[in-house]
């Protein structure tokens, strides 16, 4: 019987582990299919407080893990297949093995949608990114391309004009699905060029292993063009990792957990933290703060029950 099981080992899950472990709750942390979360595929993190010279993403989450282990947290490599949340203690199925817990913190994150190109995956952190606010700074004065047609793509393109010499916004259809106000802002921005009816067939790199261009194809004419690009940002949405919950937790239309205030879900004793609920900020620091909130709520809940 565990006091706390934490699903997810990114900033949110690891911070929750630090706090619950320091409270002598001996949390069990399940790493999930993306150990370390999205920071594990991020190169340099320059906006996390306390690191004036920056820190590598994988190193940041590893430091958090070591900190949590120092206080008594246990980390298990594994994937959560299902949960039974209808009664307490809750049951969590991890790689075929059921574990019981008095409280549950869901910090399973959200995975970026990618185009699915082999070159795209190989170049993540080397010019390919899914987070403008995380990585835009590295492309000051350079050529940037954004892929997508919704509000998030418009927002990323606008934001990236603060840094890039030019931002090219590419969409596969003949019109954008973004809201009018977001579209109008992009149209009014002289640093943004829009290309429609176009898909990316390949992301190109140089001898240094960094992105230096893309191969584009017009879906109407079939014309292929190679264009020089330094930064390639994919903004086609995120997928919250909530399928394993089996409909027991209230989710919105896109699959994100619906907060019931603080870090609470619709089930008493089950808490949320990080990108699995946060569709707005999606930053390491906000995920860490959410992990702290969930841990404190779980600790107070158990204390109220006499554990």
Image (cartoon, rainbow, N blue to C red):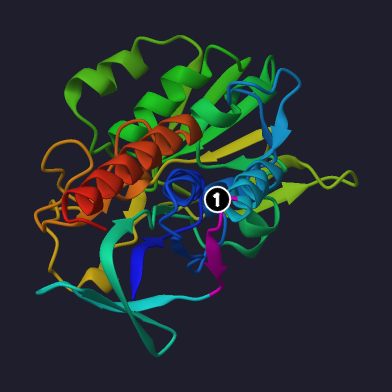
Q: Which residues are magenta?
A: 71-77
Quadrant of the rendered image containing residue 194: top left
Tell me: residue 27, above or below residue 79. Answer: above
Counting every numbered tag in the picture gives 1
Q: Which residue is mark 1?
A: 223
In this view, which residue lies farthest toward the bottom? 96
Q: Is residue 126 visible?
A: yes
Image quadrant occupied by the C terminus: bottom left
Tell me: residue 152, above or below residue 25. Answer: above
301 sits to left or right of 17:
left
Residue 166 versus residue 51: which sits nearer the camera? Answer: 51
In this view, which residue lies farthest toward the front? 306
Q: SS of the residue at dot 1?
A: loop
249 sits to left or right of 207:
left
In this view, which residue lies farthest toward the right? 207
Residue 217 on image: x %, y %: 53, 51
Residue 106 versus residue 139: which sits nearer the camera? Answer: 106
Q: Is disc 1 surrounded by few (<14), some (14 to 19) or many (20+) residues within 10 Å?
A: few
Residue 112 versus residue 177: which sits nearer the camera? Answer: 112
Residue 261 on image: x %, y %: 13, 37
183 sits to left or right of 109:
left
Residue 98 on image: x %, y %: 34, 85
Is residue 72 highlighted in magenta? yes
Question: Residue at 18% of width from left, 57% of height from top?
Answer: 269
Residue 163 on image: x %, y %: 60, 14
Question: Residue at 73% of width from left, 42% of height from top?
Answer: 211
Question: Residue at 33% of width from left, 76% of height from top?
Answer: 1
């Amino acid at each position: 019987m565990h006091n706390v099981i934490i699903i997810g080992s990114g900033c949110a899950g690891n911070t929750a582990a630090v706090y619950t472990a320091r409270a002598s709750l001996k949390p069990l942390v399940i790493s999930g299919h993306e150990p370390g979360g999205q920071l594990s595929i991020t190169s340099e993190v320059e906006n996390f407080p306390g690191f004036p010279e920056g820190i590598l993403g994988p190193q940041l989450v590893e430091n958090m893990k070591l900190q949590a282990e120092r206080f008594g947290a246990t980390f298990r490599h594994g994937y959560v297949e299902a949960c039974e949340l209808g009664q307490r203690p809750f049951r969590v199925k991890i790689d075929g093995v059921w574990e019981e817990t008095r409280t549950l913190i869901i910090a399973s994150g959200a995975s970026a949608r990618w185009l699915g190109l082999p070159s795209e995956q190989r170049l993540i952190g080397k010019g390919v990114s899914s987070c403008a606010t995380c990585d835009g700074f590295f492309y000051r004065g350079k050529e940037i391309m954004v892929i997508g047609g919704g509000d998030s793509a418009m927002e990323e393109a606008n934001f990236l004009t603060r840094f890039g010499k030019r931002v090219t916004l590419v969409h596969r259809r003949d019109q954008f699905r973004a809201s009018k106000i977001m579209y109008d802002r992009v149209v009014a921005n002289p640093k943004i060029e829009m290309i429609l009816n176009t898909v990316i067939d390949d992301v190109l790199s140089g001898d240094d292993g960094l992105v230096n261009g893309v191969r584009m194809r017009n879906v109407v004419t079939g014309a292929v063009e190679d264009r020089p690009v330094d930064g390639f940002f994919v903004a086609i949405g995120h997928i919250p990792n909530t399928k394993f919950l089996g409909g027991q937790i209230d989710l919105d239309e896109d699959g994100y957990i619906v907060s019931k205030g603080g870090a609470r879900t619709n089930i008493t004793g089950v808490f949320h933290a990080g990108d699995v609920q946060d569709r707005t900020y999606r930053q390491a620091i906000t995920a860490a703060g959410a992990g702290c909130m969930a841990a404190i709520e779980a600790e107070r809940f158990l204390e109220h029950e006499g554990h």
